[in-house]
Image (spheres, rainbow, N blue to C red):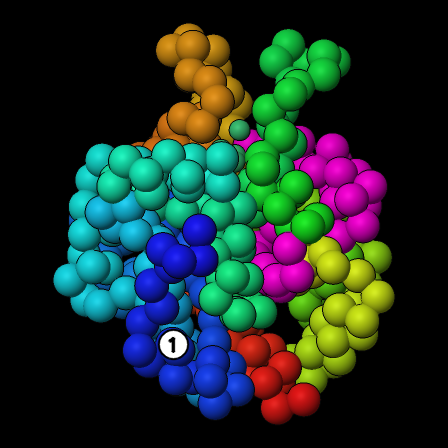
Amino acid sequence: MSAHLVIADEVATALGEGRGVVALESTLLAHGLPPGRSFEVGVRLEKVIRAAGAVPATIAVLDGVPRVGLGIGELERVCSPGLAKLSLRDLGAAIAMRRDGATTVASTATLAHKAGIRVFATGGLGGVHLSVPSGTVTWDVSADLDVLANTPVTVVCSGVKSILDIAATVEVLETRSVPVLGYRTDHFPAFYLRESAHRVPWRVDNAVDAAEVISAHGEVSGSGVLMVNPVPAEYELDRALHDRLLDEGMALLRERDIRGKDVTPALLEHFHSGSAGSSLAANTELVADNARVAAEVAVQLSSR
Ligand code: PSU
Ligand code: MN
């Protein structure tokens, strides 16, 4: 597959010079945000990463070519409605059939690693879905977790949404030996909310310490690192509103029999339309902050 990978000149140069590079996923743009808003967010994320002294590499598949680093026209294309969502299982088919598609955490981390990128920023990680009916075992476990267990890339995110089973997700991360670093927090964040009921095993308070842990982990393990950075306090969603939207969203899934890879986009859409913009603001601001933190870590890692 590496024969197919196209790395943008600016990204290739930065990697060649050992400078900090931060990968960004495109499913967040194509499916995680309402169409019409994602392009400005995509542009902003790249700007934030540059301001922190690193080079952004947004990743997507266009005409069957996995691209690491997009031009502005390509970014626009990625933000157009209806783009396929490509996890790692889908990459081979999309490449062979010359399709366009947005990459998830699983496929983005895989392509980033192939390109030599060590840090990746996003909003929320995929995880273990809630069991319906509760008490049963679900097989809807995001490939993001498996890939993180096998790919030495640090993913900076704001935890997982409470539309997932956070307890089960945290357990899987432990089983698969993926270290979770709380960035200035002792708690595993729940995306729209700064804290879930779960604690993180390790905490770091600055990018220098984070880079040190990531480097040391890389000496003993081939897995990735999950670094969790809570949504900025002023953008945290009201907890009562959050809980109501979650209940409604789960009911909607059952009513419309939405399953598999359509679950996350459907729930996100319900949050955005049901919160009069506050979930969108939270989503946008947390991703931007993750991009900044990821860039600071990438710069520290590159200077080591
Ligand atoms: N969680 C979010 N926003 C997102 C996603 C997850 O809060 O946009 C996207 C990411 O691309 C993630 C993917 O990798 O959904 C996980 O999907 P699935 O559960 O189908 O593996
Ligand atoms: Mn799934």
Q: Position of residue 136 (x, y in %)?
A: 72, 12
Q: Which residue, as the protein is rendered here, is positioned at the far front?
A: 3
**Amino acid at circle 1:** Val
Of residues 19 and 300, the one drawn nearer to the viewer in this rendering: 19
Query: In what element is the residue under mark 1?
Result: helix
Of residues 12 and 223, the one drawn nearer to the viewer in this rendering: 12
Q: Is residue 230 left or right of residue 112?
A: right
For the question of whether residue 275 can be seen, the reply is no
Mark 1 — residue? 11
Q: Is residue 6 above or below residue 109?
A: below
| Mark 1 closeness class: few <14, some 14–19, many ≥20 residues within 10 Å | many
> Measuring 33% from the left and 59% from the top, which residue is drawn there?
67
Q: Is residue 301 left or right of residue 49?
A: right
Rendering quarter of residue 144: top right
5 drawn magenta? no
Q: Is residue 246 above or below residue 181?
A: above
Question: Cβ(mark 1) to ligand 1 < 8 Å?
Answer: no
Rendering quarter of residue 24: bottom left
Q: Position of residue 171 (x, y in %)?
A: 79, 39
Of residues 97 and 47, the one drawn nearer to the viewer in this rendering: 97
Q: Is residue 298 left or right of residue 9?
A: right
> Measuring 40% from the left and 58% from the top, which residue is drawn there?
3
Q: Which quadrant does the C terminus fall into?
A: bottom right
Of residues 275 and 156, the one drawn nearer to the viewer in this rendering: 156
For the question of whether residue 144 can be seen, the reply is yes
Q: Position of residue 22 (x, y in %)?
A: 47, 71
> Measuring 25% from the left and 41% from the top, which residue is drawn there?
98
Q: Position of residue 290 (x, y in %)?
A: 51, 65
Magenta-highlighted residues: 151-178
> Measuring 32% from the left and 39% from the top, which residue is drawn there?
96
